[in-house]
Amino acid sequence: MEKEITIYDIAKILGLSPATVSRALNDHPAINIKTKLTIANKARELGYRSNTFASNLRRRSTNTLGVIVPRLNSNFMSTVLAGMEAVANDAGYNLLISQSLESSKKERANAITMYNSRVDGLLVSVAYDTDGFDHFDDFVKKKIPLLFFDRVLEHPACTALVIDNVRAGFEVTSHLIEQGCRRIMHVTGNLKRNVYAGRFQGYQDALCGAGIDLEESLTLTTDLSQEAGKEVAKQIAAMRIPVDGIFISNDLCAVSCIKSLKEKGYEIPNDIAVAGFNNDPVSEVVEPNLTTVYYPGQEMGSLAVTTMISHLNGTQNINMHQTIKLKSELIIRQSSLRRCE
């Protein structure tokens, strides 16, 4: 492997001190223009690369924020990351991004990597099966700021950035009730995750408020995949007492379910009204277009990084438990409209 050129090599060739070379490469005003140009040209000729990482470490900063997400192939998470990138780039920070692939084991490995990479702060949306905080303990002990977003873990030293999932779940279910639905199925993910627990709570609250009994058999816990959507349609078709409404906790699963129900001869929304969640682009491709909830992903990403950088700059303290809530919005489309509004 070819030896890396250092400021000591440049200094030796030019007969200058390493300190002079270092100052010139950092555009120090004490070094005259002619010397700066000489050093810059020689550095370029030799292929010198500044070791920014080492320099930042000396200043106890890497200008790098770690980000751990469940999946990168998610439209919602893509919009979150776009918001993060825009703010980080403007502030001179880099993002080190990894995905857990919905595995707590992989998430643990990612956390170790981020810690060893000396990130200045860590932003996390936890995996489907994460069941503990201990793999983040080192960050808290070292006072490395930690912010959870979307899927969060509660900890007294960490900030959480979410939407009001209870309210959103209530609004979706209430809308289906207003359309005349009385047997409403709820298809959810792991109820250990705040996002799904909140939406389920909202579903329960809306049923209770309308005087509709909660039937345990109408709550299905799945991985919310396309395959899960097909399986939901299969289960509905086998039911002795049919459902007339479905609230599914993400759009991908909801669209898959609609397609499978239509293949089985159901009319949407006349036979079954369907609503999803997240406002993914696929929600406007399926026919009929899917009623869903707008989840402000880009705003969430922007605010997460803005909050983190404000903490690092000393203008905001996130080393204490607080929950920041963003607004969501119910988007009503044809998949649930059984009555004229």
Image (cartoon, rainbow, N blue to C red):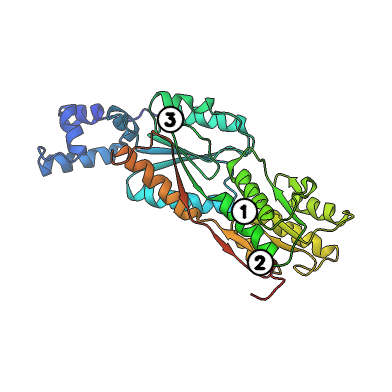
Q: Nearer the viewer, residue 173 or 332?
A: 173
Q: What amino acid is at disc 1?
A: Gly
Residue mark closest to the camera, 2 vs 3: 2
**Residue shown at the point (50%, 56%) measured from the top left:** 296
The percent position of residue 114, horizontal first and vertical second, equals: 46, 31
Q: What amino acid is at disc 2?
A: Val
Q: Is residue 45 visible?
A: yes
Residue mark closest to the camera, 1 vs 3: 1
Residue position marked by numbered label 2 in the rendering:
285
Residue mark closest to the camera, 1 vs 2: 1
Q: Residues within 10 Å of mark 3 (few under 14, many from 20)?
A: some
CA gap, disc 2 and disc 3 = 41 Å
Q: Which label's residue is closer to the chain start, 2 or 3?
A: 3
Residue position marked by numbered label 3 in the rendering:
117
**Residue shown at the point (62%, 67%) measured from the top left:** 332
Residue position marked by numbered label 1 in the rendering:
169
Q: Secondary structure at mark 1?
A: helix
CA gap, disc 1 and disc 2 = 23 Å
Left or right, 319 with reference to 108: left
How many numbered marks appear? Answer: 3
Q: Which label's residue is closer to the chain start, 1 or 3?
A: 3
CA gap, disc 1 and disc 3 = 39 Å
Q: Secondary structure at mark 3?
A: loop
The percent position of residue 26, horizontal first and vertical second, equals: 21, 38
- Quadrant into which the C terminus falls: bottom right
Q: What amino acid is at disc 3?
A: Ser
Q: Are marks 1 and 3 in contact (CB under 8 Å)?
A: no
From this view, report whether residue 341 is shown above or below residue 91: below
Q: Residues within 10 Å of mark 1 (few under 14, many from 20)?
A: many
Left or right, 177 with reference to 260: left
